[in-house]
Amino acid sequence: MKFFICLLALQQLYVQIVAQDFDFFYFVLQWPGAYCDSRHSCCYPKTGKPAADFGIHGLWPNYKTGGWPQNCNPDSQFDDLRVSDLMSDLQREWPTLSCPSNDGMKFWTHEWEKHGTCAESELDQHDYFEAGLKLKQKANLLHALTNAGIKPDDKFYEMKHIENTIKEVVGFAPGIECNKDSSHNSQLYQIYLCVDTSASKFINCPVMPHGRCDSRVQFPKF
Ligand code: U2P
């Protein structure tokens, strides 16, 4: 009997320590020009117009079978004091574009509470946001694309060219999501990179997001 209780306790311990509550992250970057073109409006944050660069949308825990956990811990609320040292980086690299114009707290609160709380076994609130910032620096996507002649100049580019360029610099194929602007142009909107559960290394995507892109897409100005 004692043996079985011990076995049960060990099994519990295994579940708590080893078992993952998600399989990988999508690190999602958004092109502000496409966000602003495809909605009725976008609003610049109170800190001013963001740079013409990809902004972070989120770092989303996902399952390799598709689907994702969300809102995992209602007791873990976003606390700006925990990221005070990251605030200027968050304002620059993870800017909100939703209306009405605001200081970004709402966006970061949403991303933490919906997604970050599902990765708390791996990253606390500070490390979650810091990981996003580091991944953005590591990917340096706009630099890679412009070096390959793919610029935010309202011109159209081959999806294959965009995908291959990102694959060359990151090491793994990205997922790409497009939006339609008011003239029904397919626009480069979000880039998904897959990341390991410690949020430090890019990996091969176990499952790709649905992209809805034409074979040629517009890279709109911002
Ligand atoms: O795609 C529309 C919205 O669904 C949420 N989403 C999508 C894919 C995924 O893997 N995980 C996920 O959460 C996003 O919601 P948000 O974080 O913006 O609330 C995405 O915008």
Image: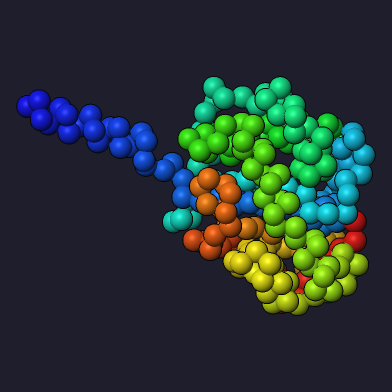
**Percent position of residue 46, x then y:** 90, 33
Residue at the image position 59 percent from the left and 66 percent from the top: 172
Placement of the N terminus among the 4 image quadrants = top left
The scheme the figure's colours follow is rainbow
| Residue 177 or residue 90, whichever sits in front | 90
> Which residue is found at the position 64% from the left and 32% from the top?
126
Across and down, in percent, residue 217 comes to 78, 71
Q: In this orientation, which residue lies closer to the viewer: 76 or 172?
A: 172
Quarter of the image where one finds residue 185: bottom right
Q: Quadrant of the C terminus?
A: bottom right
Across and down, in percent, residue 111 comes to 65, 38
- Residue under the point 75% across and 26% down: 84
Q: Where is residue 124, by image quadrant?
A: top right
Locate residue 33 relative to residue 132 in the image: left or right: right
User: Residue 28 placed where, x, y %?
Assistant: 67, 52
Q: Determine whether 26 is above or below 83 in the image.
A: below
**Is residue 212 in view from this perspective?**
no
Q: Note whether residue 73 is visible.
A: yes
Above-or-below relation of 41 to 99: below
Query: Image point 57% across, 54% down: which residue?
Result: 201
Count of all numbered marks drawn on residues in the image: 0
Rendered position, 203 above or below 148: above
